Image (cartoon, rainbow, N blue to C red):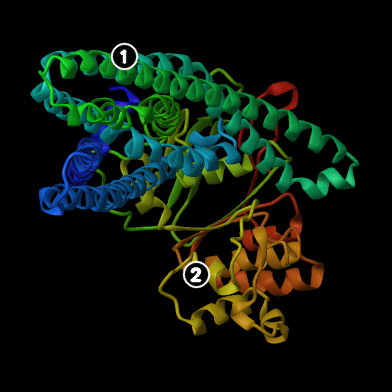
Amino acid sequence: MTPLRRLFGLAAPVRSWVLVAGLASFAAFGANVALMATAPYLISKAALVSGFAALALTVTAVRGFAIARAALRYVERYTLHLAALKVLTQLRVAFYRGVEPLAPSGLRAHRSGDLMVRAVADVDTMDAFFVRGIVPPVAALLTAFLSAGILALLAPALAVVLLAGLAVAGVGVPFASRAAARPHAARVIRSRASLHAELADDVVGLSDLLASGAASGLGDRLSGASARTGAGLRSLAGVRGAAAAAGAVIAGVTAVALLALAIPLVRGGEIDGVFLATVPLMALAAFEATHPLGEAFGTIELSRAAAARTFEVIDARPAVVDPGSPLPPPAEASVEFRHVGFGYEPGDEPVLDDLSFALAPGERLGIVGPSGAGKTSVVALLLRFWDPSSGTVLLGGHDIGSYRAQDVRSMIGVVPQRIHLFNGSLRDNVLVADGNADDDAIVDALTRAGLGELLSTAPAGLDTRVGEDGLKLSGGERQRVAIARVFLYDAPILILDEATSHLDATTEDVVLDAIDGFARGRTTLVISHRAEPLRLAGGRVISLPGRPNGSPARGRRP
């Protein structure tokens, strides 16, 4: 199914609004045509009569058509934008639901800035499809037949000439415009995505660019990307301008042709002379319904390209898929790796090979090894971010792939190596673990994580803002917020991945003691390359040797 047909399908729930908008648009154009039919007649007739009574009905009609045109145009715009916003809301929700199961494995090929463009700018671009793509062509078609029908009452030949002109302006020009706009629209969407992705990356890494003296090239890179986007937009504007000019020329030529055809008919007495001015002016009013079509078809191409990028993410198959008939959530917190092998990409050297270990409920294990040995990959497999390439990961005595991913993750609390904090308050960032927790529980978790002093000295307390990705906090404070999340999450399995690497020795001792107390009775996996956190493992440690010369990591006792 093409992207545009899928967009049509998304409009099905709001088809009543679209129908109202279409009828209002047609009625507005019809009122305009009627206005252009009656107003010239009124002026011409006024020159021939002396009493107002003969013109009263026509004057009232002119006023009514003028008011109706404005009111109906408002109804059309209101209902059509309302329908479009409802569809775009639905599309954004579908995009998020499509992205969520892809994280993190299915998003490795996408830049964060590019995903932001797809979720925001690309979806916003599709607004034009509903506002300019669905209703205007239908309204233009109905207006053409209405105008031709009125002229046919005067002379059928006039209707034929008008329909011929409208066909060229309303069909030929828009389709030529669409064909000309297609490559430019695709280029604009690609270059805009590249510009936003580049900008997002550079803004996030701006401090590093400044520190290394590389910020001078930032403007050049962004200028180049912006210039490419601007060139595409100028090309699209040129296509739209040419289409508008062509439509105006065709409208003028048709109006002149109708006038030339009507004059002999007036002289011959076939048409009353008071209708002579009505013929070309009503034709020009009919062409107003076709004028937007050239621009609309070019805009539709932008929507088509944006929709293709959006549906590409929505349709992507996650690397990890829930089973059709999942087991109920695990009844016990045991963990086992049986001869597990894993690689991130097919054909690459495996990160893990033949890794085996077992943890009964409440047991503890430490994993050590150099960078790149696969320690964090063990965590990713336990969280079902990826499935193993070979072997089996078991949770509660069953293959972890037989559970829903959410049921697996509800069993595991993780302090990750890479911590993300949201640009909100301390309260907001801890509530990620349990959205129903009250302030007392949040304060208790933060205090146990060693942030009691921060809470007591910060004037805003729990409302203290942490900044973008925790920029207002130190590295150690960011880590302790992540530990507080684990305390609040209260899961039966605890994973610590370099959980205290940013803490000074004194603070680390305090925090490790708090974690040790929290971990009692919980199945605990401690991952570190340092000795201090490994005391939580209770002396049971396995070593991942790393991958010298590309050899895979294997689990072994130190």
Residue tagged by mark 2? 431
Dot 2 amino acid type: Leu
Dot 1 amino acid type: Val
Please state which of residues 330 and 34 is positioned toward the viewer in this rendering: 34
- Residue drawn at the location 68% of the way across and 71% of the way down: 511
**Residue 516 percent location from the top left of the image:** 61, 70
Question: Residue 254 appears in which quarter of the rendering?
Answer: top left
- Residue drawn at the location 65% of the way across and 83% of the way down: 460
**Residue 146 percent location from the top left of the image:** 15, 29
Residue 421 against residue 455 in the figure, above or below:
above
Question: Residue 167 appears in which quarter of the rendering?
Answer: top left
Question: With 421 as the anchor, is 474 left or right in this view?
Answer: right
Farthest-out residue, front = 50
Residue 232 against residue 30 in the figure, above or below:
above
Farthest-out residue, right = 213
**Residue 369 percent location from the top left of the image:** 70, 42
Question: Residue 109 appears in which quarter of the rendering?
Answer: top right
| Mark closest to the chain's N terminus, 1 or 2 | 1
Please state which of residues 136 and 202 is positioned toward the viewer in this rendering: 136
Residue 342 circle label: none
Residue 211 against residue 433 in the figure, above or below:
above
| Circle 1 SS class | helix
Residue tagged by mark 1? 168
**Residue 378 percent location from the top left of the image:** 55, 42
- Residue drawn at the location 63% of the way across and 55% of the way down: 419
- Residue drawn at the location 11% of the way across and 48% of the way down: 54
